[in-house]
Image (cartoon, rainbow, N blue to C red):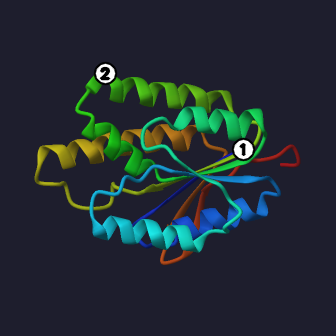
Amino acid sequence: MISFILGGARSGKSGLAEKIASCSGLPVHYLATAQVWDDEMANRVRHHQTSRPAEWPTIEAPLDILPVIKLRACDQKGCVLLDCLTLWMTNLLLLDDDQALIKRQEDFLSFLRKGVDGHLILVSNEVGQGVVPTNKLARRFVDESGRLHQKIAEIADEVIFVTAGIPQILKTKIDDHG
């Protein structure tokens, strides 16, 4: 099962993802992609750390997310909550290596297309509802994130958009019962 949760900053998307993970009935592994570059980001990370259950192991993988997902969501049939894809995209763009960016995205999407045995919850910031950024790197970030989001939404079993803490189901998997 692949769940894709989108929303703006402080929309409630991470809280919703944590509720879904808690209700999965599976062992939960939290996959963090953030890198701490300043005090403000350190505060954001601490806020997220204190909001989730202490028994969830946290794996920090700013770039190499696939090995963690493969092991925890497939081989062990657990639940992986990845928060968040836009920070992963930022990390990839900061590598300043177009080939690495393309390869990691393609590998990730190829893996997702095969499906997972456990539950993979992907959290990301919706970037397509703001103004067009004024600098080249920011425009590239919006373009790359937007394209990645579209491809993930096509693959995911469910897609949920969160606004002001209210989830809106954009796509849901239809089971055998209709």
Q: Secondary structure at mark 1?
A: loop
Q: Quadrant of the N terminus?
A: top right
Residue at 65%, 33% in the rendered image: 70
Q: Which residue is mark 1?
A: 1
Residue at 51%, 68% in the rendered image: 48
As drawn, the residue found furthest toward the right would be: 177
Q: Is residue 151 left or right of residue 30?
A: left
Res 116 visible: no
Q: Which residue is mark 2?
A: 99
Q: Is residue 50 left or right of residue 145?
A: right
Count residues near mark 2 (Cα–Cα under 10 Å), then give few for <14, some for 14-19, many for 20+. few
Q: Nearer the viewer, mark 1 or mark 2?
A: 2
Count residues near mark 1 (Cα–Cα under 10 Å), then give few for <14, some for 14-19, many for 20+. some
Q: Quadrant of residue 98?
A: top left
Residue at 43%, 31% in the rendered image: 105
Res 62 visible: yes
Residue 171: % across, % down: 62, 52
Residue 41: % across, % down: 34, 65
Cα–Cα gap, marks 1 and 2:
29 Å
Give the residue type that dot 1 points to. Answer: Met
162 or 77: nearer the eye?
A: 77
Residue 120: % across, % down: 65, 46
164 or 51: nearer the eye?
A: 51
69 or 50: nearer the eye?
A: 50
From this view, report whether residue 39 is shown above or below residue 72.
below
Give the residue type that dot 2 points to. Answer: Gln
Mark sitting on residue 143:
none
From this view, report whether residue 132 is shown above or below residue 116.
below
Residue 17: % across, % down: 61, 62
